[in-house]
Image (spheres, helix red, strand yellow):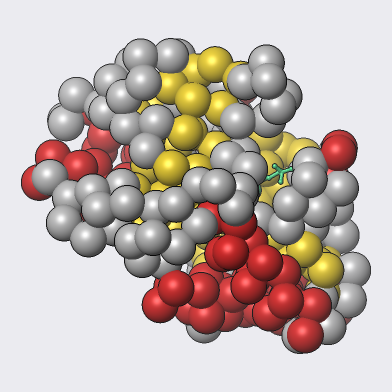
Amino acid sequence: MIKIKTRDEIIKMRKAGKLAAQVLEYIEPFIKEKVTTGRLDALCHEFIVKNGAVPAPLNYHGYPRSICASVNNVVCHGIPSQSKELKNGDIVNIDITAILNGYFGDTSKTYTIGEVPEPTRLLVERTEKAMYRGIDAIKPNSYLYEVGRAIEKYVSKFGYSIVREYGGHGIGNEFHEDPHIYHFFTTLNKIRLKPGMCFTVEPMINEGGYQVITSKADGWTVTTKDNSLSAQFEHTVLVTDQGYEILTKL
Ligand code: MF3
Ligand code: CO
Ligand code: CO
């Protein structure tokens, strides 16, 4: 069941989305060589709480930290650690979900550390563009699968692959609501977009194959099966009468 947000809820979603975006803005200058992902987690936690919000990942199905920090071949759900230092040439996705007055804002970006090889820089840049291509396909009364179709059309040119096991999600006063958002074309997303729907667009793009593995050690960390690099960007969006509004913006 896809919940159409009321005007009141949309105001709350805007506030939650803006705060999530502000967390990314706040943490960006700290994302440097030698910082640990555990330190980034602690700083984001403090910022979120000081702003009267709650970090949604913490204790979510037993998740142990307040953000996800996914380095290099980690696709998503990387657990921040005080022993994981970022190094020159790394890429890291920082995924923030904040709950403000009961409503969720969910956004992520992938950052490059120091000097990264040109192919790596391109993977990150094109993953962000892929997300915006997907978002730009959002129009009331068109089908949700246009989002995945636009992403797939763009990404396929580069020989990258799109992760199939994880996708975007409806979002509101719950973290993960209907519908599931596929980042590739499928009639499973033959759903008419209606004003008032809120969902995330968050493609995970691999330099190699699409297959992923979940860590048996921690039950969370998702890596590429071939250990190739993976990048991701995420926004929370609202379907409007005109098209869409990105809620996780400053
Ligand atoms: N923020 C992630 C998403 O985009 C979900 C993280 S769930 C967690 O859906 F438990 F790993 F934090
Ligand atoms: Co999300
Ligand atoms: Co997220």
Residue 126, can we see it?
no
Question: Residue at horizontal 50%, vertical 18%?
Answer: 212
The spot of residue 218 in percent (x, y) is 70, 27
> Image quadrant of residue 11?
bottom right
Left or right position of 61 against 194: right
Task: Name above or below for residue 65 compared with residue 244.
Answer: above
Question: Residue at horizontal 43%, vertical 14%?
Answer: 225
> Image quadrant of residue 185?
top left
The spot of residue 223 in percent (x, y) is 49, 25
Question: Residue at horizontal 79%, vertical 42%?
Answer: 63
Question: Residue at horizontal 63%, vertical 43%?
Answer: 79
Please name whichever residue, 10 or 195, is drawn nearer the observer in this view of the structure.
10
The spot of residue 204 in percent (x, y) is 44, 37
Task: Name above or below for residue 78 compared with residue 212.
Answer: below
User: In the rendered image, which quarter contains the N terminus?
Assistant: top right
Left or right position of 200 against 108: right
Residue 25, can we see it?
yes
